[in-house]
Image (tube, rainbow, N blue to C red):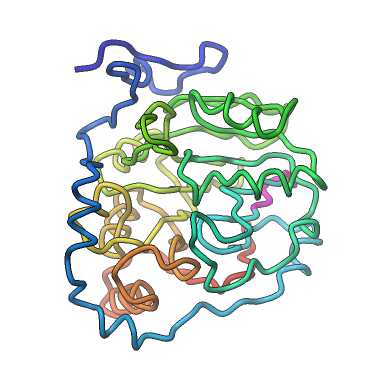
Amino acid sequence: MADTFLSNPALPIIRPDWQGNALQNGRFLNQFRQGNQSMLLALKWKLTTNPQKDEKKNDKWLPEVLDPRAFLNSQQDGLVWLGHATFFIRLGGVTFLTDPLFFGVSMLKRKVPFPVQPSELPPLDYVLLSHGHFDHCDKDSLKTLRKTHSFTVLTSLKMKHLIQSWLPGIDVQEAGWYQQYQLRENQPKVYYLPAFHWHKRGLTDNNQILWGSFMLQTPEHTLYFGADSGYDQHFKEIQKLFPQIDTCLLGVGAYNPAFIMQPSHTNPAEAVQAFKDLQGGTLVPMHYGTFDLSDEPMGEPVRWLRKMEAEGEIPGKLQVLAIGQALPLK
């Protein structure tokens, strides 16, 4: 049971019945059920033989990498997948970068390069940081970006201290779930929303910083960035507040073995179910093809999605992007 609820008192709450994010002994809780992040599961993983070992070894698939600079330097609304969970997004002429990750992380090397030099990214209005895991909240990438760009960070409760320790003086807005950030007049509306996930950067800081997802909205377009999340009821809850979501950016990789990955990420079938729950128009998969994080073969997520598409199991449109490929948004 929660012993307190927390939100940012400076920001509006958009869900009428929402008390704030539940905490227990200073640690944030998921909304519907708690995932098991025991180190014993990690040990079990290391001691378990991967049933897809040979298939994975023989799978040489990697995503195509394209040059995104023509779109980046345009004024057109749209998005570019830059690998993993990093997207450049331009909505209403306002620019966003999600979970910037330019390099390898935590001993893991990128399988494909970041498609431009970070200094070549256009001017940025906002950086969206969904949560504190190293492959989404990367100190080196943020410090590199700060050398050439000025931006405001939109992120989660209890994250400000960490970010400002790396980037002194940076403007950081923290939000709890179902809260709206304060952006300038006539800019897109940006909301922080739930995810089924967790936080850890050190030995004892489990769930001391909140995790979540984002909705970006203009009168012409509504875009959901799902960040890292396992499948749960929150997708249906989000749809109730946002009945017309044009574009959904959802993770489809790092899902095997399920006993450790399922409370953190969605496999392609779970991502499609989330897309159905959100009643989205276009599904853009992410969180695959950039790093080797789990037991499934690198190309399996795309093959699985294509099979579901061929069998008519994906409503709306599936848009599988190359890294660096632009998707214009009307």
The structure residue drawn at horizontal position 43% and vertical position 34%, both measured from the top left corner, is 193
* Front one among 202 and 295: 202
The structure residue drawn at horizontal position 28% and vertical position 74%, both measured from the top left corner, is 308
* Front one among 241 and 83: 83
Residue 195 horizontal/vertical position (percent): 36, 40
Left or right of 284? Residue 166 is right
Left or right of 76? Residue 80 is left
The structure residue drawn at horizontal position 39% and vertical position 63%, both measured from the top left corner, is 293
Residue 218 horizontal/vertical position (percent): 61, 41
As displayed, is residue 301 above or below residue 17?
Answer: below
Magenta-drawn stretch, dominant element (helix, strand or loop): strand
Q: Give the range drawn in magenta.
A: 89-94
Quarter of the image where the C terminus is located: bottom right
Q: Is residue 69 magenta?
A: no
The structure residue drawn at horizontal position 22% and vertical position 32%, both measured from the top left corner, is 32
Residue 131 horizontal/vertical position (percent): 47, 39
Left or right of 113? Residue 315 is left
